[in-house]
Image (cartoon, rainbow, N blue to C red):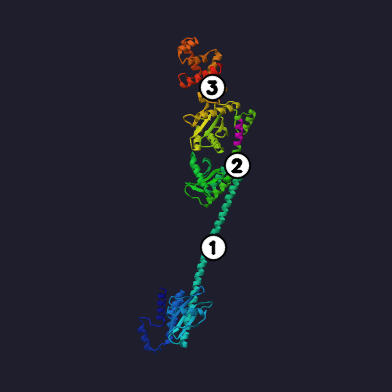
Amino acid sequence: MASSRAHQLYRRCSDREGGLPRGSGGRYRTAARRGPRPPAPTPADHALRELMVLSRALFDTPDEGEILRLAMDHIAAAGPYSAEAGYLKVDGDLVPSPRNGQIHALAVNRRVRELAGQDGPVTVPGRPWGRALGLRGLERLHGYLVVTSRSRPTEAERSLLATLVRHTAAALSVAFAHRRQREDALELHRLREERTALQGQLISVVAELGYQRDVHALMADVAASGGGEEAITRALHGLTGLPALVEDRFGRLRSWTGPSRPDPYPEPDPVRQDEMLHAVAREVGPVRIKDRLITLVRPHGEILGVLALVDARDEADEHTVLALEHAATSLAPELAHLRDLAEVELRLHRELVDDLLAGTDEASAYARSEAVGHDLHRSHYVVVVQWSNRTADDSFAQTVGRAASAVGIRSLLTRRSDHVVLIADDRPHARALYEALARETGTRSGTIGVSAPCDSLDDIPHRYQEAQRALEVRRHSREHYGTTFFDELGLYRILGPGNDYRELETFVHEWLGQLIDYDSRHHAAMVETLSRYFDCGGNYDETAESLAIHRSTLRYRLQRIRDISGNDLANVEDRLNLQVATRVWKIVLGGHG
């Protein structure tokens, strides 16, 4: 296509320089009549005009290859010449023109390269004359034209050929200069774009470093000020604009800053919580889980808590991640410090409880309990907790302590090889502690035993045995899991090994104490009457006869027994416990109050 455009340009120039304009023949004929006819142009004049037209075409063509092809196609304008080959020098090498002939290509190529930039003769069979002419600019060789002639050129034809070669070389110089300008302009444009990109990167790096310094400084200030978890979540929310929160490793909320806080905060699922912790621990850096960006707070590999951002719209970028990581780094020593304090407090609690369970000096126990913020002067209950799928380690002890606090039980805590012991300042609810521990552990396979109330520190070792007894009775019952209170065991309190005389006295006092006191104050025989009634199998006549009283007197006494003791003789369980109590009173205790 470029060759076609060059030929069209050449023809237009030829028309302007050599031919007559169309439609103008009359005017020129009139002029001829008026004056002498001009001399006819010579072949030399015609050749010069063609070279001038070719020169313009060469300089109007921007492509180096097209310039070479145009010169080769119109080499005959300079004389009886043929263009055998043409070469352009590209990156130091001579590249043949596609117009080169194939017959003598190898020989011509070899000869041109042997000339090494100089002009010289070229031998082509059938041609008496041949030359390789260098296309030279001011600073470099642009290529070669290999020209042959059917006859030896005249001096004038040699001169015209030299002119054509010089014009071609000059046109190539211009084209190469334009190419260099374009390339330089493109390179300059590329360099400017690269500079702009580098400046943008530099600005971004500076901004990033500035942001990092700001984040680091803010978190360092928060940590140095001892602001704690709330200060860290407040700073993180301010940096990111997203709600920030801290949970303990069990999924319970410790701190929340920002909008849309759930109320109430959902109870964690222990199984799902463990799965989430393991999933996040396997990754490097924060992990997205649903609408939260989560990172673990784990100094020295131990997971102490979870720091998260609520990012429902997935807006978090690298700055958000950076702020979250710095906040987690600042939070780690805070949680480690709290953990250390909790361990110290737990150790003090354990030492105190261990001494109380073994028996200790009251004055020392009261002083130590005040030091840990617990009031031992109140009535207490000993609570024993055992869970089938959990060993009684520190982790489970902390779980029991959390569950007790969650249901409002203030307590001191220690652990044994297979159970956890609480000394609680109030009677636990029948199901609250058990349900809280079932949620914490994710399983209901646990048993809790609760002692009778303890009004003095000296009673605690005995109450501990009661709580263990209640737990054992529950574990061997039909429903193994749940809470059992010792003072609701009835007859089971005195069955089984390990029950001493004191336990028998306590059982008798619980069921017959009011009747014994009544007999003592009124010199009556209510306990004896009840014992005879059970010995006679509940037969009124036999009982009245054995006591030597009237039947109506017996009926009166039995009603008084119901009123004084508050027990119903028609109730099977009350009747059984009363009968056993009267037997123990009569046989083991000798019938004494």
Residue 533: image location, x then y, percent:
48, 15
Between 201 and 140, the one nearer to me in the picture: 140
State the residue at coordinates (57%, 38%): 394
Q: Earlier in the sequence, mark 1 or mark 3?
A: 1
* Mark 2, residue position: 337
Residues under labels 2 and 1: Cα distance? 50 Å
- Is residue 124 visible in the rendered structure shown here? yes
- State the residue lying farthest toward the front: 497
Q: Is residue 150 magenta?
A: no
Tell me the number on the disc at residue 195: 1
Residues under labels 1 and 3: Cα distance? 95 Å
**Residue type at mark 2?**
His
Q: Earlier in the sequence, mark 2 or mark 3?
A: 2
The residues colored magenta run 346-356
- Where is residue 541, by image quadrant? top left
Q: Is residue 34 above or below residue 433?
A: below
Magenta region, main secondary structure: helix
Between 486 and 532, the one nearer to me in the picture: 532
Q: Which quadrant: the C terminus?
A: top right
State the residue at coordinates (59%, 28%): 461
* Mark 3, residue position: 507
State the residue at coordinates (52%, 40%): 250
Tell me the number on the disc at residue 460: none
Residue at disc 2, secondary structure? helix
Residue 313: image location, x then y, percent:
47, 48
Q: Is residue 152 above or below residue 429?
A: below
Residues under labels 2 and 3: Cα distance? 49 Å
